[in-house]
Amino acid sequence: MKNTETLKELAESYLREIEPAKKFGILLKAENLLKAYNYTTKTKLFNDLQISYFASVNSSQKIVKGEKLNFDTLILYLSASKNAGVDLCKFASTGCRLACLVESGHSLISSRSGKYTIQISRIVKSWLCIYRKDIANEVLKAEIETAKKRADRRGKKFAVRLNGTSDIEFYEVINAFQDVQFYDYTKDFTRHELPNYHLTFSYSNDSKARIKHYKEAIRKGQSIAFPVLASDYQDAAALRDCFDMDSTDLRFLDNKGKYGILKVKLNDNLQDGIKNKFILSLDELKTVIETIEN
C-alpha cells in the first residue's frame, strides 16, 4: 500500500458511489490492495489504513452498561449487511437489513452530519476481515490481550463481543483466549458455542424455516432475542418466559427465560423494520412465541 489514504479513499468512494458496476470496480481495487499488503506491525497497519483502533472498549450506550457489573467489554463494529460490498450478515432477513442498528448511535450522528467518518472506517475494517482475515485476527488478538491486561490492572472483569454489527465467525481468535469470555448474537443456525463463547439467537421473521431454527436454539439452551417497540417494551419483558435484555449487553450472564426483549434503538429505518415484521409489537411478539411453543 503506497500511501495512507488509498484504502480510505476507496472506502469513501464506495460509500458514495451509486452505480453497481463502479462499486464492484472499487471493491476489486480494495481487494487487490489488501491481498498485496505486507503486514509488519499493528502500528504501521493502522497508519496505512488511517484508523486509530480496530475494536474498542465500552464504546456504546448499551455496552457501557456492563460497567455497573464491573465489566470492561471489547467490541468490534464492522459495516453490517452488504454495506461494504460483502455480506457480513448472510442470514439476516429483509426487515433486519432495513432496520439495522448500523445506523444508530454514533454512526447515525456521523451520517447526519454528512461526514460519514464512522461508516468509512467500518468499511475499511470489514474489507480487512474479509480479504485479509489473517491480519485481522492478529490485530484482534493483540487488542484483546492489551484490553484484558488493562481490565486486570483496574480490577475489572473482561468480556469480548466480536460481532457488534456483523455475524461472522472468529473461532481462531476465540480459541486463542480460553480464559476470556466471548459472546455474540447470531442468526447463523450453524454457529456453535464453546466453553468460553456464549451465543444468543436473534429473531429475523416468523417463516417456517426460522421458527424451526428458534426451536432448535431453545433446545440447545440458547435464548431468542426479540426487537420490540419501545412503547411495548415493558409489557413484553413481563410476559411469561420473557426477560429484559436492555439493562446490560452481557448475555452470558442471562439465566432468566427463553425470550429476551430488546428495546429498538433510534435510527432512520425504524418504519421499514416495523413494516417487515422484524420490529414487533406486543401482540406480534405473543403470536410468534405461541408459534414457537406449539
Image (cartoon, rainbow, N blue to C red):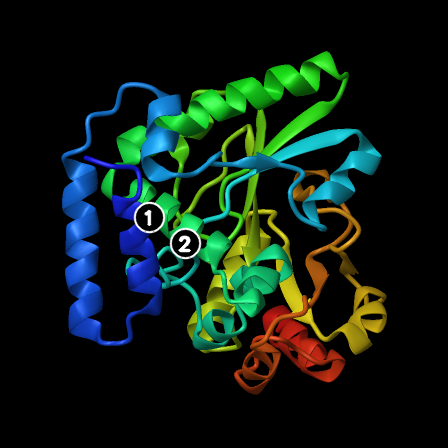
Q: Position of residue 256 (x, y in %)?
A: 78, 49
Which of the pair 159/110 is nearer the observer? 110
Pinpoint residue 55: horizontal percent, then vertical percent: 51, 36
x 21%, y 73%: residue: 20
| Badge 1 density bin: few <14, some 14–19, many ≥20, Cα 10 Å | many
Q: Residue at x 28, y 70 (%)?
A: 17
Residue 178 visible? The answer is no
Is residue 90 placed above or below 231 in the rendered structure? above
Look at mark 1 in the image and give the residue it sits on: 8
* Residue 214 as seen in the image, left or right of residue 6: right
Q: Position of residue 184 (x, y in %)?
A: 55, 45
Give amino acid for label 1. Answer: Lys
Depicted 237 relative to depicted 280: above or below: above
Residue occupying the point 43% across, 50% down = 122
Q: Which mark is residue 46?
A: none
Tag 2: amino acid: Ile
How many neighbours does mark 2 have within 10 angstroms: few (below 14), some (14-19), or many (20 or more)? many
Whether label 1 touches label 2, CB < 8 Å: yes
Query: N-terminal of the two: label 1 or label 2?
Result: 1
Position of 183 compared to 286: left or right?
Answer: left
Q: Which residue is mark 2?
A: 120
- Indicate left or right for 96 with 237 as reference: left
Of 207 and 78, which appears nearest the observer?
78
| Residue 141 in view here | yes
- Which residue lies at the image location 72% right of the left edge and 75% below the top edge? 229
Give the percent coordinates (x, y) of residue 261: 72, 62
Helix, strand or loop for disc 2: helix
